[in-house]
Image (cartoon, grey):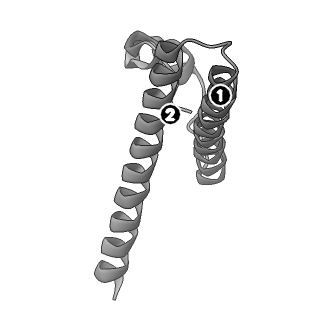
C-alpha cells in the first residue's frame, strides 16, 4: 500500500542524526531493508484492494456511502497503477544492466 507519509518524514534532515551516527549498511542489510520496504508496500496495496471489496459489499446492502466506495476504489486503482509502473521501471533497469554486461 502506498501510505500517506509526509515528505518531511522521509527527508534527509529527519534521517541525518541517526544515519550519520551509525555505520554504513552492508549490501546484505541494504537488500533486506529494501525487500522489507517493498513487501510492506505491496501488502498495503493488497489491503487497499481488500478494503474496496469490503466497501463494495457494504454498499450493496446499503451500509456504505457511494462517495466512500468511489474514493477507496480510486485510491486502490492509483496504488496498483503506481506499483505496476514501478515494476515496469525495475524490469527496464534489469534489462539495461543485462545489455551492458553482455
Which residue sits at x=65%, y=44%? 39
Q: Choose between 94 and 51: the one closer to the eye.
A: 51
Which residue sits at x=37%, y=60%? 88
Location of mark 2 (residue)? 76
Which residue sits at x=58%, y=37%? 45
How many numbered discs? Answer: 2
Q: Quadrant of the N terminus?
A: top right
Left or right? Give the position of 53 relative to 24: right
- Mark 2 element type: helix
Where is residue 94 shown, x and y percent of the image?
A: 40, 69
Q: Distance between the residues labelled 2 and 1?
A: 9 Å
Residue 11, quarter of picture:
top left
Q: In this view, does 39 lie above or below 67?
A: below
Q: Choose between 67 and 75: the one closer to the eye.
A: 67
Which residue sits at x=33%, y=66%? 92
The answer to whether the residue labelled 2 contacts the one labelled 1, judged by CB atoms less than 8 Å apart, is: yes
Earlier sequence position, callout 2 versus callout 1: 1
Left or right? Give the position of 42 relative to 80: right
Farthest residue in the front direction?
61
Location of mark 1 (residue)? 51
Where is residue 29 shown, x and y percent of the image?
A: 65, 46
Q: Choose between 61 and 16: the one closer to the eye.
A: 61
Q: Choose between 64 and 96: the one closer to the eye.
A: 64
Where is residue 10 shown, x and y percent of the image?
A: 44, 19
Left or right? Give the position of 95 relative to 66: left
Q: Which mark is residue 38?
A: none
Q: Mark 1 packing: few (<14 Cα in 10 Å), some, or many (20+)?
A: some
Q: In this view, does 88 lie above or below 4?
A: below
Amino acid at each position: 500500500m502506498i501510505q500517506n507519509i509526509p515528505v518531511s518524514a522521509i527527508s534527509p534532515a529527519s534521517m541525518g542524526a541517526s544515519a550519520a551516527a551509525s555505520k554504513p549498511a552492508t549490501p546484505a542489510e541494504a537488500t533486506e531493508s529494501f525487500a522489507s520496504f517493498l513487501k510492506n508496500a505491496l501488502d498495503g496495496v493488497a489491503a487497499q484492494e481488500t478494503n474496496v471489496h469490503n466497501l463494495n459489499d457494504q454498499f450493496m446492502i446499503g451500509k456504505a456511502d457511494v462517495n466512500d466506495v468511489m474514493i477507496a476504489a480510486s485510491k486502490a486503482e492509483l496504488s496498483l497503477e503506481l506499483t505496476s509502473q514501478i515494476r515496469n521501471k525495475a524490469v527496464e533497469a534489469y534489462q539495461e544492466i543485462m545489455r551492458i554486461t553482455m
